[in-house]
Amino acid sequence: MQGEMLEMRQIGTSYQRVRCLLPRQGEQMKASLTAHGQLTALVMVKRPSGLEVIDGFKRHRAAEQMGWTRLRATAMEVDEHGQWAAMLALNRATPSLSVLEEALVLREMVTLGMTQTEIGQILSRHKSWVSRRIGLIERLHPELVEQIREGILPPGAARRLLSLPAGNQLEMATVVMHHGLGSQETELLVRLWKNADPPVRDYLLAHPHSALAKARAGDPEEPPDPRLTPRGQQLQRYLRLLQGVAPRTLPMLRPRPAEEDLVILASDLESTKSSLGRLMEALTSAGPRKS
């Protein structure tokens, strides 16, 4: 392993602002350092303020927490534009940057005055790749970005909140963190919330686990009302089937079908009339009781 040993006080970590803290990865790094020592040198750049890390933040954080006083590091000669491109390149072979972290790096490059086209050319990426990632940051509430960076909100769950308005992102994120919802659970809860009326939305936020358990058994595109009992949810599915079939059946009966068809369909028509008659009686008796 090349590089030189540096005291911890010589190692700057201000660029850590584009990385997200993931506690599980931190524990894994501690275990690796304990078992094998430092296998890979930190990569640093020289700035007027001193040496700054651009690769090896997890190693540095874990070593610091373990009480290490020195780490091996190697320096790169790049300018401010190049340091961000280098950070992305160093993590491309074995992807360790999340999509959100890539977006944070790209935003730094935009802040330096670079256009998305210029960034794409430097990174050998299409402009659309740059645009999509920067769009993630622009659509996420700033408070959520900080929560992700601090390891409070998982990046995967945060991405599922992008389709919500900024204010509702915070409300939903609170529910996700309080109830420990994963990415897939968050995605389903967001979908339910978007398709629901205000009273149902309140229920979803107050009882997410119960709502998700009921919704998984239904149609994910048009899930039943999570406030319903299992029997009530089954009834809602059947009622929705009837609502979908009735408008498609009516044009088949008006104008009147051909006589030769009616002869063949006579028994089906009578059976359906009888079934619908009993159904109408049941629907009428099941209606809300008047006080």
Image: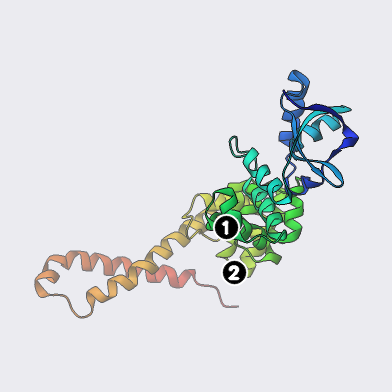
Give the percent coordinates (x, y) of residue 115. Answer: 63, 61
Q: Which amino acid is tagged 1?
A: Arg
Whole-number angstrom distance, CA of label 1 to CA of label 2: 31 Å
- Tag on residue 197? 2
Q: Is residue 91 above or below residue 166?
A: above
Q: Is residue 178 above or below residue 10?
A: below
Where, by quadrant of the figure, is residue 182 drawn? top right
Q: Tell me what residue is drawn at x 73 percent, y 55 percent.
A: 145
Check the image and name the residue furthest to the top: 35
Q: Is residue 259 above or below residue 132?
A: below
Give the residue number, with chain letter if any, for mark 1: 132
Give the percent coordinates (x, y) of residue 240. Answer: 42, 65
Residue 77 can be seen, yes or no = yes
Q: Which amino acid is tagged 2?
A: Asp
- Tag on residue 278? none
Does the CB distance between marks 1 and 2 fall below 8 Å?
no
Q: Tell me what residue is drawn at x 71 percent, y 55 percent.
A: 108
Give the percent coordinates (x, y) of residue 202. Answer: 67, 64
Q: Is residue 253 left or right of residue 134?
A: left
Q: Tell me what residue is drawn at x 48 percent, y 68 percent.
A: 286
**Lower position in the chain sequence, tag 1 or tag 2:** 1
Where, by quadrant of the figure, is residue 132 drawn? bottom right
Check the image and name the residue furthest to the front: 77
Q: Is residue 276 left or right of residue 72?
A: left
Query: Where's the N terminus, which quadrant?
Result: top right
Q: Is residue 143 above or below residue 285?
A: above
Query: Where's the C terminus, which quadrant?
Result: bottom right
SS under mark 1: helix
Residue 211 can be seen, yes or no = no
Q: Could you say which is closer to the camera, residue 210 or residue 185?
A: 185
Q: Could you say which is closer to the camera, residue 94 or residue 11?
A: 11
